[in-house]
């Protein structure tokens, strides 16, 4: 049986990836340090599965990470563990440096030593389209320059550079992926879509930064996970792969579509109205990536339309409201990332 390590597996993308990997009969070792965004509710459906193992560890604990690699000898590590929320990076950038840069450094050091004795392994480092910064026109390609705008995206850009340097210098078998905005089940409600869903269900106003014109490329998390598995099986070591849907929407359009979806599921309360709030400092106007490489080289393309994905997402949160109760309410409702 083949072992795969997923870091950050109590989070949004990680737990959805574990779902997919177990369905494909891989044994998955979930390594997560358990932060505010970790949620054991995300793994409740497979926590007793013989193909699943949870280990609590920070990536900065190099000794423990090295022992995990030695014990389980994985065919792949999907490095998804990261501090991810831009607003939090504005308030507390140090946490992002510690996790997204130093954590990746320690993982790379452990992996480099492990690879000397275990050649049948690879590392897939999962990153973001935000490293490219504002893309007013066109779509970012894998060889475009990085121009991160926030401490979060700068820390992710740094981690990408670190991983690539270890590929070039030490010859580790690594691949770097940069994905567009994910949405779907199990996403922390500090992010736009689940926050809006939480507010709709709880009859609260719907906060939108600025004028709601900031545009993002949206991809359903299941499509992202499917792409990651295909990259594991068919991707070329040393390469970067953009993963996206080629479908952009501004935030105001997202809210309007979500309201329409919600109306078909529940009776919406009188307080559910759009409210424009003070914008985020340094807010990028548009992200958009060119995903032709993964489509042409690996044969992957997204399957879930935004409308279908949005309906699936709202239905999941409606049926799993206990998910919210497992989180600190302040992490759901408190506004952060306002420069003072």
Image: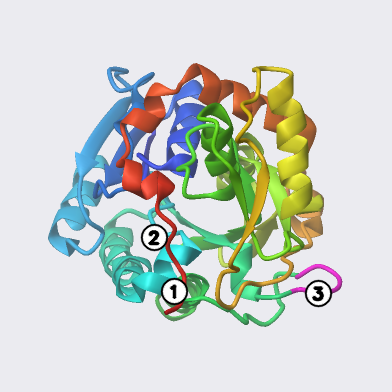
Q: Residue at x 45, y 59 (%)?
A: 84
Rate crowding at label 3 as few (under 14), some (14 to 19) or many (20 or more) other CA atoms within 10 Å: few
Q: Secondary structure at mark 1?
A: helix
**From where the camera sits, is residue 57 visible?**
yes
Mark-to-mark CA distance, 2 and 1:
9 Å
Could you tell me residue 143's position as x and y percent? 71, 76
Camera-nearest residue between 246 and 320 = 320
Rate crowding at label 1 as few (under 14), some (14 to 19) or many (20 or more) other CA atoms within 10 Å: many
Camera-nearest residue between 188 and 232 = 188
Left or right of 130 on screen, residue 120: left
Q: Check the image and name the residue furthest to the left.
A: 63
Q: Which residues are magenta?
A: 135-140
Reading the image, the residue beneath label 3 is 136
Could you tell me residue 275's position as x and y percent? 65, 51
Camera-nearest residue between 314 and 18 = 314
Reading the image, the residue beneath label 2 is 83
Image height of 125 relative to 55, above or below: below
Q: Earlier in the sequence, mark 2 or mark 1?
A: 2
Image quarter where the C terminus lies is bottom left
Left or right of 263 on screen, residue 115: left
Q: Residue at x 49, y 77 (%)?
A: 154
Q: Check the image and name the residue furthest to the front.
A: 270
Reading the image, the residue beneath label 1 is 155
């Amino acid at each position: 049986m083949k072992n795969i390590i997923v870091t950050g597996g109590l989070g949004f993308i990680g737990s959805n990836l574990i779902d997919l990997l177990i369905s494909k009969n891989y044994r998955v070792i979930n390594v997560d340090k358990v932060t505010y965004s970790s949620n054991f509710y995300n793994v409740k459906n497979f926590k007793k599965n013989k193909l699943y193992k949870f280990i609590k560890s920070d990536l900065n604990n190099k000794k423990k990470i090295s022992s995990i690699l030695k014990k389980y000898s994985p065919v792949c590590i999907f490095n998804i563990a990261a501090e991810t929320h831009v607003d939090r990076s504005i308030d507390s950038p140090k946490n992002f440096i510690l996790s997204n840069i130093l954590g990746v450094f320690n993982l790379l050091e452990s992996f480099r030593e492990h690879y000397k004795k275990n050649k049948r392994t690879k590392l897939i480092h999962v990153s973001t389209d935000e490293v490219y910064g504002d893309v007013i026109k066109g779509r970012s390609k894998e060889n475009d320059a990085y121009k991160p705008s926030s401490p979060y995206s700068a820390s992710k850009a740094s981690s990408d550079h670190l991983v690539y340097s270890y590929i070039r210098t030490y010859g580790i078998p690594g691949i770097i992926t940069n994905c567009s905005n994910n949405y779907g089940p199990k996403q922390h409600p500090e992010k736009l879509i689940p926050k809006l869903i939480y507010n709709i269900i709880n009859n609260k106003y719907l906060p939108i930064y600025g004028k709601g014109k900031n545009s993002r490329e949206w991809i359903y998390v299941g499509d992202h996970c499917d792409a990651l598995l295909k990259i594991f099986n068919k991707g070329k070591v040393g390469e970067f792969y953009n993963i996206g849907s080629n479908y952009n929407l501004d935030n105001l359009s997202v809210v309007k579509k979500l309201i329409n979806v919600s109306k078909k599921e529940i009776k919406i309360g009188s307080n559910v109205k759009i409210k424009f709030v003070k914008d985020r400092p340094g807010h990028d106007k548009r992200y958009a990536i060119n995903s032709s490489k993964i489509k042409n080289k690996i044969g992957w393309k997204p399957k879930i339309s935004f409308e279908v994905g949005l309906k699936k997402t709202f239905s999941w949160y409606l049926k799993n409201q206990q998910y919210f109760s497992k989180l600190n309410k302040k992490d759901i409702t408190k506004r952060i990332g306002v420069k003072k």
